[in-house]
Amino acid sequence: MTRQDDTSPAGPSGFTAFGLRAEAETIRPGLHVVATPIGNLRDISFRALGTLAAADAVIAEDTRVTRILLAHYGISTPMVAYHEHNAAVMRPHLVARLKEGASLALVSDAGTPLVSDPGFKLVSDVLAEGIAVFPVPGPSAVLAALVVAGLPTDRFFFEGFLPPRSAARRQRIAELAPIPGTLVFFESARRVAETLADLAAVLGDRPAALARELTKHFETVRRGPLPELAAMLESEDPPKGEIVLLVGPPPEGAAEASAEDVDSRLRTALLTLSVKDAASVVSADTGQPRRKIYARAVELAAEGRAAAP
């Protein structure tokens, strides 16, 4: 049965699931942010299907990818491409269409929109115009990886993609080191071995997990200390598919580290890191104030330069 909404201009359409054709309920005017499967096409809600079918248009990051999903469920809603290369040009047109009373559905290539895609700016502009935005929740690679990693889930920090070059990547990792929660990263298959090596070099022996091709046929989750995972990836061909990396938080109870232990950690860190980055890492590992650790790192670095031949 279709419920009519007098405030919406979008007429009912339909979708096919489990071999049955269903009529979609009319949706309200505004921007509907719709989560889509991250790999397994069955991981989509009836509400998401109904929204995609009833919308005036689907705003897609890559229409080729979204077309596969819509075709699978017999949805014929027209699509509009919206991605990082045309976002600045397309946003005013989409906002104008919404101001006229349209019902538009925003999707990403996979998972929940606004996570590592240009959707945030569109939502921001839409809200600034007083237009309604509706969440249609569902799959997320971040949460899917987090619940199977075996790492703490009470607090986590999603970083997205780290810098592509090692020096910048290590610096950013050092900045993230003190965060008291599980760190979550996206990474490309060709760069994951290098990234794991840098994570191990900066963060040490923290527990970690590599989740690959989640929800798909070749779904794989590998768990272990960072150095162990880094060694595995270094000795193998690059993995295929979408990858999420997760790293456990700094160890608890490390704040009682002795001065000798702090100096030892700093000397080791200074072999590969700058004074700033070494201080960030050791501060995170010991729980001691970064300002104090940084001052000691400066002293040790000066001693090292003075002792050099």
Image: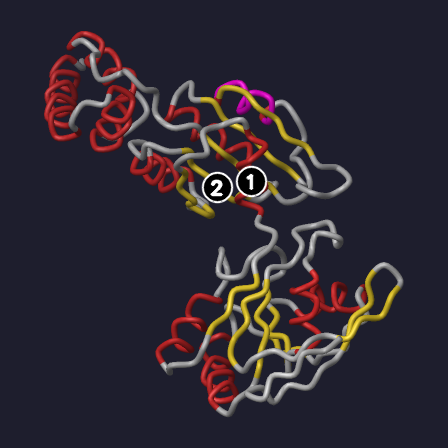
Q: What numbered label is drawn on residue 185?
A: 2
Give the quadrant of the N terminus.
bottom right
Q: How far is the residue under mark 1 from the one under mark 2?
A: 6 Å
Horizontal and vertical percent position of residue 243: 59, 41
**In which quadrant of the rendered view does residue 264 lie?**
top left
Residue located 22% across and 9% down the image = 261
- Callout 1: 10 Å neighbours few (<14), some, many (20+)? many
For the residue pair 305 and 36, the one nearer the viewer reads as 36
- Magenta stretch: dominant secondary structure: helix
Question: In the rendered image of this protein, does residue 297 appear above or below residue 79?
Answer: above
For the residue pair 191 and 241, the one nearer the viewer reads as 241
Question: In the rendered image of this protein, does residue 78 appear above or below residue 6?
Answer: above
Write down the region rendered in magenta. Answer: 227-233
For the residue pair 291 and 302, the one nearer the viewer reads as 291
Q: What numbered label is drawn on residue 244?
A: 1
Residue located 42% across and 78% down the image = 126
